[in-house]
Amino acid sequence: MTAHPPPFGLFAPDAAPIALPEPFVRWFAQHGWAPRPHQLELLAKAEAGASVLLIAPTGAGKTLAGFLPALVDLSRRRRRKPGERPRGVHTLYVSPLKALATDIARNLERPVAEIGLSVTLETRTGDTSQVRRQRQKLKPPDILLTTPEQLALLIAAKDAADFFSDLRYVVFDELHSLVTSKRGHLLALGLARLRKLRPDLQTIGLSATVSEPAELCRWLVAQRPGASPEADLITVEGGAKPDIAILQSEERVPWQGHTARYALPEIYAAIKAHRTTLLFVNTRSQAELLFQELWRINDDTLPIALHHGSLDVGQRRKVEAAMAKNELRAVVATSTLDLGIDWGDVDLVVHVGAPKGASRLAQRIGRANHRMDEPSKAILVPANRFEVMECRAALDANYLGAQDTPPLRDGALDVLAQHVLGMAVAAPFRSGDLYDEITSAAPYAGLPRETFDRIVEFVATGGYALKVYERYAKIRLTEDGTWRLTHPRFAQAYRMNAGTIIEAPMLEIRMIRRRTASAIVRGGRALGKIEEAFLETLSPGDTFLFAGEVLRFEGIHETSCLVTKAASEEPKVPYYGGSKFPLTTYLAKEVRAMLADPARWSVLPDQVRDWLSIQKLKSVIPGPDDLLVETFPNGKLSHMVLYPFEGRLAHQTLGMLLTRRLERARAMPLGFVATDYAISIWGRRDLGEMIAKGSLSLDALFDEDMLGDDLESWMADSWLLKRTFRQCAVISGLIEKRHPGQEKTGRQVTVSTDLVYDVLRAHEPDHILMQATWADAATGLLDVSRVSDLLARIKHHIVHRDLDQISPLAVPVMLEIGRESVVGEARDADLREASREAMIALAMGEPGN
Amino acid sequence: MNALARRRRHVECEALEISLAGERVACDPSGVLYLPAEDCLIVSDLHLEKGAAFARRGMFLPPYDTAATLSLLALALDRWRPARVVCLGDSFHDRKGAALMPAGEREALASLMRGRDWIWIAGNHDPEPPVGIGGETHGEISVGALAFRHEPSAGPRRGEVSGHLHPVARLAGRGSRRACFATDGDRMILPSFGVTTGGLNVLDRAFHGLFDMPRALACMIGHAGIYPVRFGALSAG
């Protein structure tokens, strides 16, 4: 058996001078290790009173670096005398994942014991028992490892000031992933409160490489009006460059689709040739499919497992345990494994489908190897021809060290509303003080006072222009100038609903024996959870893939989805298998540049090169900043295909807007379909001819003003906006998921947020929650900001080609038609059709006779 | 289009005339039922003051639902001009709703009630007569061959018209949920009328045993009319 590598990336001693207390020096020496320079540098800066951001690749010993200042400080602390008041928490560690907090606690226990420190460390997550939470409150551990949601609860407690009275350090792990979401906003507000309780508090951020480190440095320290101070930055350069290749397949790369089925034999061969392979895909459905297909050809019955967030927790833990013990040869996984958990000896990462972002690719490849000095090995498997170019661009970016992590958004208003209530639960507040505190958090540094005041009104009584809820206020401005909670039950409700992870309503999947006609079925093995929205598209008898099995949908019983084992091996119902991540702006630009420059095609496989060459012959290859618009007939319809390369979400928005404009120009559009790369719109009139004759102007069609009038009026009633509103309504506390005395699942929420939205939009369209919804939608589901950038970019750069037939470049998007539903307002045609028979029966007499 | 705007446009759509336990009735796309023989209009599950009921528990839903529901009801009353109105229960979302209703809404409701017989059927949300509103309150009443009550009674019952379950239906395959009148020609369950009331699929267990399945129809409210669809052509969810 080979020796285990040292924890935290500690390697053979070098000559670095050690400014460490004696027990630490001895501990390092005993193991034949030495602290790394960045670990000592971080310690020195922290000792000097600074907050620090450490950016380092996986395997660089980030975790120990982050805890070293705390451990050193704790080692110098004198023992508490009997009768002295119990000490509060000394160091708080916040991680995005429960599992990661647990993992880190376990990894820290060993050095703490070996160094001989008298330090207590405990985790506190959603899984921590009530008994243990109470003990933690009465006897706080020195180091507490927790999640953003738990921090929100801790600071909303009445005894928060005592609990944190000795707090010296807060360590944020995987900060790059925490800050991009609403959880990050909540966490930033929590940090602002901690700083108020302990003004001398120091923060330490641990992060993977990001495109704008300065943003994170500001996030870590208090912001002031007119100044944006930053934490100190320590950057550790990456170790060995990863060894990444694009799969060179003997098979034909498909035109479209996301399954990469063509490459299966080659993927299987790669698994056989390595010890342990991690296979990443972008969505759960892709994971299910790949897993099933691999087992179909698994003649050697290699232990291959499946891991995604919807699987039953028990099943996931089993896979994780087997993985840690190196019992598996391969795991097919979605992003649940993206974050830094230790995963045994993975020696190959296979990425099936394009990674959609250069930084995401780098982080996933980082899984392959936790030893910084050995190169990670990875294979990219593009699922279609455009993905070949995208994989190539991602690979080039990886070698260049380019980063395309998303820019940080302004703090969300729904999160702010939740926090304001939490602060009222903690203690009465003056709005001026709370405003100053909140704007010290980087995401809220630019928050106008007026918006803040409207949020306070929203928390108090809903913030409606029609002030009829005053008597039911949750918080009320009292004579001493403070806002106070009006009833303790609101504190209870807050504690039950705090947090920002909003999941789509999920139903539990239960495997039953074949359903009998009348019996109500109980029990059955739980397989995991599935989105309600997906089930709504199924009829009893339909088959689909889940947990590696083909299941037959039997029906829904309360909050369970009942399934039986399906007889066939082929699932009948496919569902959207593309990426949930849109293509990043950076990669999109790279793909456009690669497309525009035939000299760069030499790195592409022959078949892809041929495809582009024929495109050049039959139509045109657009320049890097051009927007190519092709029109051609297809059967009785006329098609317009454009290639913006801005990702599916932005394309969907653009497609809706263009269809509306074409309607107004009497071009009679019938529908459209959007992919990550292109949009195809079709209609009855000859679009090419309309453009040629000047009755349709492309410049006018793509004019930037479409984001104003058209977007407002049309998107306001789209399901995308309603879904966004639902999130905002729940996070802001307008609607409670859980109410004291009754447990509710997503399915049982008694209020339809869609209907609430309709009423609010009709009566008070500029309500603060509507504003929050629009702000979310602009960067989220609608990706409006990207559409706006696109429209500015292509102004005067539209290249139109009217063709006799479909162009090579158009084939992939044309093949998507019919696979995906066209987004548009549902009409009555289906209903009329379905009612015909009953209509006739009615006309003839009694219904049904 | 906004769901409220869509409902306002239902005034322009034709009602579906069918025979219920031998009585001629019209299922109006606004969600009300009209009985020509008795000049009587039936509406179910108004859930007035639902926003306020939630506000009393700390969830500040928009305070505009009552006004919106009443303005839709006004359109339906204007269309049929009935001499008598029966509200099939859950007219108010909670027991305090009627007493604490703001003056504006109170006046709007009073003007709808003026000059006609108005009957409140007690529902599970509003078991007592509405305070200070007027009208008569009953647990159940009979009009012609039909009997009106809030909750459907278990098992078949010819001529019963009820609400409570908020029936909605969805076509098998694609399509969104639509509110519907559920009927088998013998009895009927009305859709909920209130603007913020959700729905329960007619294939849900709660509807089991209420209808003679081969004859059961969901008269679904579409954008431009009412469409009767057999239960066999529907899907759950």
Image: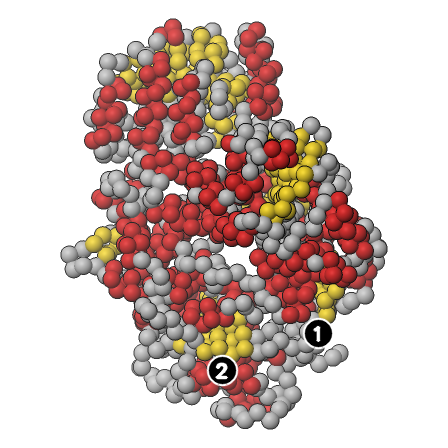
| Vertical comparison of B87 with A723: above or below | above
Residue A732, image x and y in percent? 38, 50
* Residue A680 occupies quadrant: top right
The answer to which quarter of the image holds residue A821 is: top right
The picture places residue A744, in percent across and down from the top left corner, at 44, 44
Would you call the spot at circle 1 few (<14 residues within 10 Å), some (14-19), or many (20 or more)? some
Side of B42 where A398 appears, left or right: right
Q: Amino acid at mark 1?
A: Pro
Distance between the Cα atoms at labels 2 and 1?
26 Å
User: Which residue is labeled 2 in the image?
Assistant: A42
Mark 2 vs 1, N-terminal side: 2
Q: Residue furthest left?
A: A479
- Asked if residue A98 lies left or right of residue B109, the reply is right
Residue B16, horizontal then vertical, whole percent: 48, 14
Q: Quadrant of the C terminus of chain A?
A: top right
Task: Give the residue displayed 32% in from the left and 12% down from the top.
Answer: B82
Q: Are marks 2 and 1 on the same chain?
A: yes
Q: Chain of mark 1?
A: A
Q: Nearer the viewer, residue A824 or B69?
A: A824
| Image marks 2 and 1: residues in contact by CB distance under 8 Å | no
Q: Which mark is residue A375?
A: 1
Residue A645 versus residue A224: which sits nearer the camera? A645
Q: Residue at x 60, y 54 (%)?
A: A625
Q: Quadrant of the N terminus of chain A?
A: bottom right
Q: A780 or A422, which is in the foreground?
A: A780
Quadrant hosting residue A33: bottom right
